[in-house]
Image (spheres, rainbow, N blue to C red):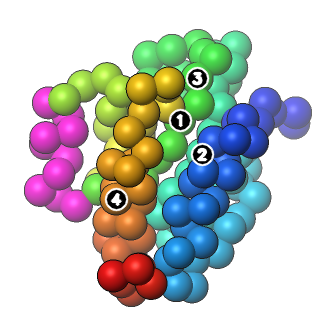
Amino acid sequence: MNREQPPEAVVDRVRAICAQLPDAREHEAWTGTSWRIGGTTFAHVIQIADGRPPAYAKAFATDGPATVVTFQAPPEDRDALRATGHPYHLPPWRPGIVGLVVEHSTDWRDLGERIEDSYRECGGRRARSE
């Protein structure tokens, strides 16, 4: 199945964040690119286009085009992100998952911290820079 891939610039930015996390492995996902610690995905970049993938289009309330990064959020952060609303969304397919629609105004420092939190939520050790 031919799926539209997320912009390489976004993948590269997430890749740079994940490269600082011990034992994080990049993985070509069923769509887009994901990063894992052990067997658990802690970050995933996908592209929504023409209403596909349908579960993402529904969860993020858009037919696209939109680039999305999903990550695991600590329980204490999920309610705050839910209350924040767009660009944050809480897809229903895995407890604790949060998604961010990447936009020109995306705060990459904040997203980096959220990806590092996700890495730890999924069993990773502290980042090298800490």
Circles 4 and 3: CB atoms closer than 8 Å:
no
Q: What kind of residue is marked 2?
A: Val
Q: Residues within 10 Å of mark 1 (few under 14, many from 20)?
A: many
* Residue with the mark numbered 1: 68
Where residue 115 sits, quadrant-wise, is: bottom left
Secondary structure found at label 1 = strand
In the picture shown, does residue 13 fall above or below 54? below
Q: How many marks?
A: 4
Q: Is residue 81 magenta?
A: yes
Q: What kind of residue is marked 3?
A: Ala
Circles 3 and 1: CB atoms closer than 8 Å:
yes
* Residue with the mark numbered 3: 66
Quadrant showing the N terminus:
top right
Residue at (64%, 17%) from the top-left corner? 65
Circles 3 and 2: CB atoms closer than 8 Å:
no
Circles 1 and 2: CB atoms closer than 8 Å:
yes
Q: What kind of residue is marked 4?
A: Glu
Quadrant showing the C terminus:
bottom left
Circles 2 and 4: CB atoms closer than 8 Å:
no
Q: CA distance from mark 3 to mark 2?
A: 11 Å
The magenta span reads: 74-83
Q: Residues within 10 Å of mark 3 (few under 14, many from 20)?
A: many
Q: What kind of residue is marked 1?
A: Val
In the picture shown, does residue 20 fall above or below 2? below
* Residue with the mark numbered 4: 113
Q: CA distance from mark 1 to mark 4?
A: 16 Å
Secondary structure found at label 3 = strand
Q: Residues within 10 Å of mark 2 (few under 14, many from 20)?
A: many
Secondary structure found at label 4 = helix
